[in-house]
Amino acid sequence: MDGNLSPTNLEYYEDMFKLQSYATLLSSFLNEDGRQTLVLDSTIFHPQGGGQPSDKGSISNPLFKFIVEDVRSKDKIVYHYGHFEDSRKDENIEKGAQVLLTVDEGRRKLNSRLHSAGHLLDICVRNVGWDHLEPGKAYHFPDGPFVEYKGEVPHNELKSKPKELELEASKLISKGGKVSVSILPYDKASELCGGSLPDYIPKDSAPRIVQLGDSLGCPCGGTHVNDISEILNLKVSQIRTRKGVTKVSYNVE
């Protein structure tokens, strides 16, 4: 592995709907766990993070095709893990080669719907009277998406609220609304998010803010639908509250 790699340009940050693009291969090597790894100067592949699974797809040129099975980011460098379709060895890959990136469209769309539905759930939680809850840990994987909120709710509301949340989500989905993503100066981002940002965001940074329709924005590095209506349908499967945390499990259908 080359220890002098530059930060990867995140193309999906500005264009979440780009499913093909070209990049330059910077490094190809076996990771410490034995996985073949490619590093590029830029990528449209979303790495796993922020509660969202990574994209999958392929990286290719006339000499090879690399199947991308997992994508991770560390120290601003994105690592694409997978295997060469023809079992080709690392030494046959030339640094500086131009490659075509192709993201699996179906997986990207599902991940984006699940992630956007998590943000929509935040809005619904406030709208049904649980505005004291603060979003915390989120998991937007297809095998059991949920959002955990700081704060508890009355146990006598746990049976009625799932239906209320679903009705609120249905109303917002039917109405629709543009989902916008912007990279903004800290002060402007803070204003769009209701006057404050989480402490982990440096004040000299330019956060990436997602906003569903005319709702308050929030910092987010994930991919999303273009319009709220594309979420299609949000179902709340369970709500649990204990030890200062309320967990809302959901799915999209």
Image (cartoon, helix red, strand yellow):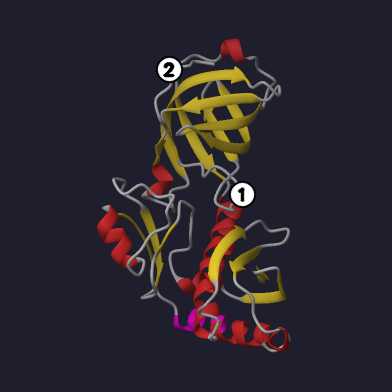
Q: Which residues are magenta?
A: 169-175
Separation of residues labelled 2 and 1 (CA atoms): 27 Å
Q: Amino acid at mark 2?
A: Asn
Viewer-proximal residue among 217 and 181: 217
Quadrant of the image containing the N terminus: top right
Label 1 near label 2: C-beta < 8 Å?
no
Residue 104 is one of the magenta-drawn residues: no
Predominant SS along the magenta part: helix
Quadrant of the image containing the C terminus: bottom right
Q: Amino acid at mark 1?
A: Pro
State which tag comes first along the sequence, 2 or 1: 2
Count the marks: how many?
2
Q: Is residue 212 left or right of residue 242?
A: left
Task: Give the residue furthest to the top.
Answer: 91
Q: SS at mark 2?
A: loop
In the image, residue 198 above or below residue 41: below
Residue 172 is one of the magenta-drawn residues: yes
- On the image, the x and y values in percent for residue 65 come to 59, 28
Q: Which residue is mark 2?
A: 4
Q: Is residue 240 left or right of residue 151?
A: right
- On the image, the x and y values in percent for residue 66 come to 60, 29
Mark nearer the viewer, 2 or 1: 2
Alpha-carbon neighbours of circle 1 within 10 Å: few (<14), some, or many (≥20)? many
Q: Which residue is mark 1?
A: 53
Alpha-carbon neighbours of circle 2 within 10 Å: few (<14), some, or many (≥20)? few
In the image, residue 143 above or below residue 231: above
Q: Is residue 69 left or right of residue 208?
A: right
Q: Residue 128, located in which quarter of the rendered image?
A: bottom right
Q: Residue at x 68, y 58 (%)?
A: 142
